[in-house]
């Protein structure tokens, strides 16, 4: 499982799971200008550029997803 970090208002927090970050976003706890980093990233990037990929899959999407 990848760990993720968020930087907002001059503070870096984490590690978080994708589910935790998405929940914080949905609850309005992360500003739109937040930055994102994980161990596969080479640099910080805008959270807005990756947040859609954190959206949880529906049950149907999970059933149709190829095995990993």
Image (tube, grey):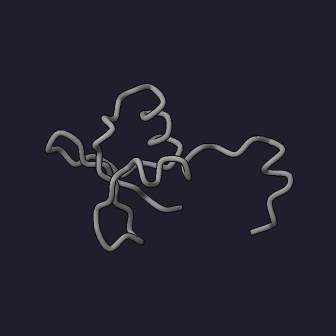
Q: Residue at x 29, y 44 (%)?
A: 34
Residue 16, x across and y down, in percent: 41, 48
Q: Residue at x 48, y 47 (%)?
A: 51
- On screen, residue 42 versus residue 22, left or right, reads left
Q: Residue at x 85, y 55 (%)?
A: 64
Residue 35, x across and y down, in percent: 29, 51
Find residue 36 and report its image quarter: bottom left
Q: Residue at x 48, y 62 (%)?
A: 2
**66 or 1: which is nearer to us?**
66
**68 or 35: which is nearer to us?**
35
Q: Quadrant of the C terminus?
A: bottom right
Residue 32, x across and y down, in percent: 33, 38
Up/down of 7 relative to 2, above or below? above
Residue 55, x across and y down, in percent: 59, 44
Exactly how many numbered labels are in the figure? 0
In the rendered image, the residue lying farthest to the top is 27
Up/down of 1 relative to 57, above or below? below
């Amino acid at each position: 499982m990848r760990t993720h970090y968020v930087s907002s208002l001059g503070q870096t927090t984490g590690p978080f799971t994708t589910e935790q970050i998405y929940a914080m976003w949905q609850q309005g706890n992360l500003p739109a200008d937040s930055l994102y980093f994980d161990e596969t990233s080479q640099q910080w990037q805008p959270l807005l550029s990756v947040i859609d990929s954190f959206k949880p899959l529906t049950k149907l999407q999970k059933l149709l997803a190829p095995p990993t």
